[in-house]
Image (spheres, grey):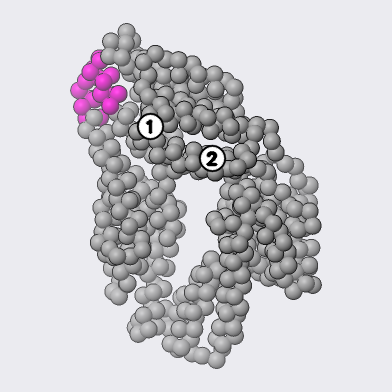
């Protein structure tokens, strides 16, 4: 479920993905004689050779997962040997630095719009007419698993074509059941075409009394999908009401209802209502405690309980803050910053912390509470972050060094500084130095909240036999 994937996204995971992307960074390229860039020519070749088209929509010089897909699958010998025998390979690139011809840029942009590409990498399996058969993207397991997935897509598609050929001969519930099989096939192909939506509505109409259990099977997810669309347009409250309406339908299987509550939890998350996220997740767990998702839900409950507690602590501290002044206010602000840092960080949260940091330094101008020194480090580190984001990596690195020279900083502060410096090295593709700094960061505070993330990153880097050195392409 989409909700499950989104709910698992924490700050630490975001950082982990960013670093892993940097670790595997390598400009993707179309292999000579294997990948084509002319889409019309690829279709013509597929038609002449009676093959499928495999179209890779990629950001070759900036998209980390695209680079990983090439490095782990497309550039491997088993794929380069087997794939061209079965597919015509076409690369549709959207680089940020590499220059493409105007014709190629125009072609790729038209195809991005035509096929509604929303992210990279997107890999489409197509027929020789350019009709989409299946959607995929980055997938772990190497070239063998990827080729197996593509082969499975081919078998599923052939079965769907055979089922569609029978449609005109059946009516009523038999047609509904046949359409159900076809829709299931499209789901296996990750192909949510307009036809699927039309068939879903027809199935509901053909089973109005839910005699075959198909009305509820299709009506429930349709309402959930409509709720997600409402949420995307900003109508979160209305979206939650629609989910409640869907959950009230009779005859909805437990695991489908669980999915509905997971989607509702996702909507609560977009509102940063972490207490509601936890309550909704607990309901989801109770509905189907033995489902495959249940063990993951426990982890989400634990994760968001911590966030709910931090949010509640912030409310109490802010109430106290209104009555305080001087050093007492500075100490409360210090606690507020710690609580705020436990929540997912967005621009608003970062701005709030920056404002509190400046006030703390002003309130403890003589460092009587030790807060001026503590927050000067944080302020300098914040400056380093801004410099790094502006591409001024040398200045950013110097700012981190200055922050780390602050006397008496904690091991966790040292860890944050070294982690930022590691990110700067990785952004310059200096992997060896980046790995060294990650290890130093872990040593600075081996039992911190960030430590498990650092351990995972270090393990991933050390698996790389030939780390990329600064300046390599």
Circle 2 is placed at which residue position? 461
Q: Residue at x 40, y 56 (%)?
A: 3
Q: Residue at x 33, y 28 (%)?
A: 337
Q: Name the side, left or right, on which 341 lies relative to 332.
A: right
**Residue nearest the viewer, comparing 368 with 312:** 368
For the C terminus, which image quadrant?
A: top right
Circle 1 is placed at which residue position? 446
Image coords of residue 184 (percent x, y): 49, 74
Q: Is residue 323 magenta?
A: yes
- Label 1: state its secondary structure: loop
Quadrant assignment, res 169 = bottom right
Query: Considering only vertical position in the picture, is 450 above or below 295?
Result: above
**Residue nearest the viewer, comparing 216 with 410:** 410
Looking at this rendering, what residue extends furthest in the top direction? 366
Q: Name the side, left or right, on which 262 lies relative to 5.
A: left
**Is residue 111 at least partly visible in the picture?**
no
Query: Considering only vertical position in the picture, is 132 above or below 327?
Result: below
User: Bounds of the magenta span?
Assistant: 318-335
**Is residue 169 at least partly visible in the picture?**
yes
């Amino acid at each position: 479920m989409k909700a499950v994937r989104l709910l698992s996204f924490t700050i630490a995971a975001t950082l982990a993905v960013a670093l892993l992307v940097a670790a595997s960074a390598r400009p993707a390229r179309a292999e000579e004689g294997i990948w084509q860039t002319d889409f019309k020519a690829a279709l013509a070749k597929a038609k002449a050779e009676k093959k499928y088209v495999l179209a890779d929509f990629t950001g070759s010089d900036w998209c980390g997962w695209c680079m990983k897909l090439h490095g782990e699958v497309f550039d491997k010998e088993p794929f380069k040997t087997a794939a061209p025998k079965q597919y015509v390979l076409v690369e549709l690139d959207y680089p940020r630095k590499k220059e493409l011809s105007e014709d190629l840029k125009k072609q790729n942009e038209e195809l991005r719009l035509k096929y509604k590409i929303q992210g990279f990498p997107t890999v489409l399996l197509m027929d020789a007419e350019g009709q989409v058969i299946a959607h995929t993207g980055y997938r772990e397991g190497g070239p063998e698993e990827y080729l197996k997935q593509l082969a499975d897509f081919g078998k599923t598609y052939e079965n769907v074509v055979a089922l569609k050929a029978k449609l005109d001969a059946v009516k009523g519930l038999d047609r509904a059941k046949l359409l159900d099989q076809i829709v299931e096939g499209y789901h296996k192909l990750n192909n949510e075409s307009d036809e699927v939506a039309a068939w879903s509505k027809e199935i509901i109409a053909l089973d109005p009394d839910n005699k075959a259990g198909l009305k509820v099977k299709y009506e429930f997810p349709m309402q959930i999908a409509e709720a997600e669309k409402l949420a995307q347009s900003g109508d979160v409250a209305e979206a939650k009401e629609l989910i409640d309406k869907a959950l009230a339908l009779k005859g909805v299987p437990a695991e489908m209802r669980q999915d509905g509550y997971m989607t509702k939890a996702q909507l609560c998350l977009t509102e940063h209502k972490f207490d509601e996220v936890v309550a909704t997740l607990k309901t989801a767990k109770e509905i189907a405690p033995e489902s495959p998702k249940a063990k993951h839900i426990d982890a989400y409950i634990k994760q968001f309980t911590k966030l709910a507690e931090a949010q509640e602590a912030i409310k109490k501290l802010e109430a106290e803050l209104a009555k305080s002044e001087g050093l007492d206010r500075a100490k409360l602000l210090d606690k507020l910053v710690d609580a705020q840092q436990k929540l997912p960080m967005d621009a608003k949260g970062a701005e709030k912390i920056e404002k509190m940091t400046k006030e703390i330094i002003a309130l403890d101008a003589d460092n009587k509470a030790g807060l001026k020194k503590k927050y000067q480090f944080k302020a300098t580190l914040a400056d380093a972050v801004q410099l790094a984001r502006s591409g001024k990596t040398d200045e950013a690195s110097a700012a981190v060094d200055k922050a780390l020279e602050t006397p008496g900083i904690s091991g966790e502060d040292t860890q944050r500084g070294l982690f930022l410096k590691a990110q700067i090295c990785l952004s310059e593709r200096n992997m060896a130095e980046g790995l060294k700094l990650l290890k130093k960061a872990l040593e600075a505070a081996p039992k911190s909240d960030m430590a498990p993330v650092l351990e995972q990153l270090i393990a991933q880097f050390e698996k790389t036999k030939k780390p990329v050195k600064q300046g390599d392409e």
